[in-house]
Image (cartoon, rainbow, N blue to C red):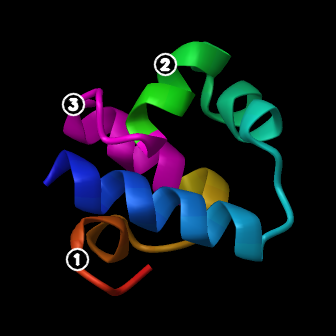
Amino acid sequence: MAQILGENVRKVRLERGMTLESLAIEVGLAYSYMGGIERGQKNPTLAVVERIAEALNVEPVLLLTPNAG
C-alpha cells in the first residue's frame, strides 16, 4: 500500500508541476519525509494522506488506488 501511495503521489505531483519541496511545504512535512512517502518507505497516517490529497486537489482514495494516480 505504501508503494502504491508513493507512486500515485509522485505521478499527480508531477502532473501538477509541483516540486517535492513545494508539496512538502504545503502539506507541512519535512522534505525528507515527503520523499520517503514517494519512495514507499514511509507509512503516513490517514490524516497525512488527506493533507497530501488536499494539496494535490484530488480525493484521498485516488492516492490509495493501484494504477489510478
Q: Residue at x 72, y 39 (%)?
A: 20
> Residue tagged by mark 3?
43
In what element is the residue under mark 3? loop
Q: Which residue is drawn at 22% across and 40% down?
A: 46
Q: Which amino acid does label 1 sit on?
A: Thr
Question: Of the residues under marks 1 and 3, which one precedes in the sequence?
Answer: 3
Name the quadrant containing residue 26: top right
State the extent of the magenta-drawn residues as a range. Answer: 38-53
> Residue tagged by mark 2?
33
Instruction: Tell me, yes or no, if residue 57 can be seen here.
Output: no
> Residue tagged by mark 1?
65
In what element is the residue under mark 2? helix
- Taking the image as shown, residue 34 lies to the left or right of residue 2, namely right
**Magenta run includes residue 52:** yes
- Taking the image as shown, residue 42 lies to the left or right of residue 18, namely left
- Taking the image as shown, residue 39 lies to the left or right of residue 46, namely right
**Magenta run includes residue 8:** no
Mark 3 touches mark 2? (CB < 8 Å) = no
Q: In this view, does 17 lie above or below 28?
A: below
Question: Of the residues under marks 3 and 2, which one precedes in the sequence?
Answer: 2
Give how far apart the Cα atoms at labels 1 and 2 are.
Answer: 21 Å
Q: How many marks?
A: 3
Q: Callout 2: 10 Å neighbours few (<14), some, many (20+)? A: some
Q: Which residue is drawn at 41% across and 73% down?
A: 59
Give how far apart the Cα atoms at labels 3 and 2 are.
Answer: 10 Å
In what element is the residue under mark 1? loop
